[in-house]
Amino acid sequence: MPQRRKVRGAAGRRAALRWWLLSLAAAGATVTAAASLLAVALHVSSSASSRASSPGVPYRLSKPREAGELRWEQEFAPPQLASPQSRKLDGAADDAAEKRWWLPAPSRRFTPCVAPSPEYKSIPMNTPSDCLVSVCLNSVLHSDFDLTGAGPGLSRGYLLVHTNGGLNQMRAGISDMVAVARMLNATLIIPELDKKSFWHDKSNFSDVFDEEYFIHSLANDVKVEKKLPKELVKSPKFVRYFKSWSGIDYYHDEIYPLWEHRQVIRVAKSDSRLANNYLPPDIQKLRCRAFFQALRFAPPIEALGNLLVERMRSFGPYIALHLRYEKDMLAFSGCTHGLSQTESDELAVIRENTSYWKVKDIDPLEQRSHGYCPLTPKEVGMFLSALGYPSSTPVYIAAGEIYGGESHMVDLLSRFPIIMNKEKLASAEELRPFRQYASQMAALDYIVSVESDVFIPSYSGNMARAVGGHRRFLGHRKTIIPDRKALVRLFDKVDGGLLKEGERLSQRILDIHHKRQGSPRKRKGPVSGTKGSDRFRSEEAFYENPLPDCLCQPESPASDASLVSI
């Protein structure tokens, strides 16, 4: 049990209350909602003076962390969290063991390397991918390609982009379109965010992202303007669905010639329109500059996100749990484990009535057995316990409204009572400007997740990939990726009485995940035997793991973008 220190005044009362809450958690007691809210109220009130100045302070991510050396070919395991005998969930582990729960995986000192090469300024990015300087320079000089030396060449036309999907799907699409605009020598108009998807979010680009920063940070790469010139607003436009996972040759051969007939090309969808691999190194680095740097969130979002991080840290080191157990996810995936028949029927109706979800008839048992379903809150609690985290661990839920509410959170809360989210950490007044906008609320979760001591996604969706990649970019911060297929088999044995929770289950789960904690490795290529679009779909997404393209060791030259793990 931690020792209490005498502190006078309001600060002492707040410290005493926090100590009392942690003491309850250490004893295995459940912290009531009222007590949790009271603790958060003290956090909110104690931060009132800092809120006055926070909105004007740009959000800054902390510096990458460093760790020891390891080999290049695969992800290596971090030090063991603790021996099975010492992983008793009573919150009374010693300091050394507690530190091991939070240690990042070995890093090998990779740091971001996204500066453009000297060739980037002299050779245009719309040169065909097989064109080497010594071979193709003469043909380029006699073509329409621009050869300006200081950045984007003379614009051939305007690129209008309609993004699609949720926050992180749109972020990836926007970053790809920045690269495409560079390849086409096009002027990029500030992209239009998706307003017709499941969430019906009416946010504009400037509501979610720092528009001025986006424009100026890419000034040496792509010309970005807020609107089309007035004379072109009503002019004829080419509307195109760019081919998915396309390389530079596709844009050179099929899209670039369109500028001869129209001044404006409208991109109907932005997701997955650029290949993950085998693009020129400078194009890959530009994608990283756009995704990880230029797409900074709008100042009000970053200010509140920073404040949420500060309030979570007042509880100590914390886990950010992307608990993808929301209505849209369960309806889309057809996953119904642990739900009532009424809930399952409701999700089936939603899936049937959502026209752009193509698959309607889904076998939930088959989905779960293959690891295609998000872990349930109960399963997440079992997973965290088996990893050795004590019940006093603060957990931030990065998610929208959990389907079924508190009824599905009981098991997780019984194991980890210090459960927080943005609604608990922020006052109603602080959240009011963002509450009606799903993308802006998701951006707050994104900031808290990137800055967490440990990030754990219950499902490998767009946010899990984006946050995981961002944490790799910032120094391979600890990110534990659950092996859902293996876990559900173990959990089903527990439910069936064939296996008990305890040392044996814990050791098996630790063994499964000791190389799934975010240490450096090359991006995975396609699954062997896959063909066509399935082959591209099976690759690890570029923004999920920007190594080797955008991460280098200080003592080594920039990595070759053609190297991927197969």
Image: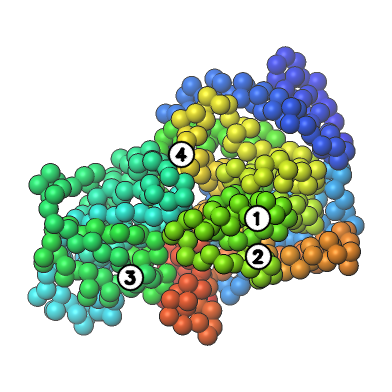
> Does label 3 or label 1 sit earlier along the sequence?
3
- Give coordinates of residue 158: x percent, y percent: 19, 55
Mark 2, residues whose alpha carbon is within 10 Å: few (<14), some, or many (≥20)?
some
Gap between marks 4 and 3, in whole Å?
30 Å
Secondary structure beneath label 1: helix
Marks 4 and 2, how far apart at CA: 30 Å
Residue type at mark 4: give it: Tyr
- Whole-Å distance between the Cαs marked 1 and 2? 10 Å
Q: State the mark number for residue 364.
A: 2
List the single residue furthest toward the bottom. Answer: 529
Q: Residue at x 59, y 67 (%)?
A: 362
Circle 2 — which element? helix
Q: Residue at x 22, y 52 (%)?
A: 223
The answer to whether the residue labelled 4 contacts the one labelled 2, judged by CB atoms less than 8 Å apart, is no
Between discs 1 and 4, the one toward the N terminus: 1
Q: Quadrant of the N terminus?
A: top right
Q: Whole-percent x and y of residue 60?
A: 48, 41
Mark sitting on residue 243: 3
Answer whether labels 1 and 2 touch (C-beta < 8 Å).
yes
- Residue at which label 1 appears: 344
Q: How many angstroms separate mark 1 from mark 4 (CA)?
A: 27 Å
Q: Is residue 360 above or below residue 160?
A: below
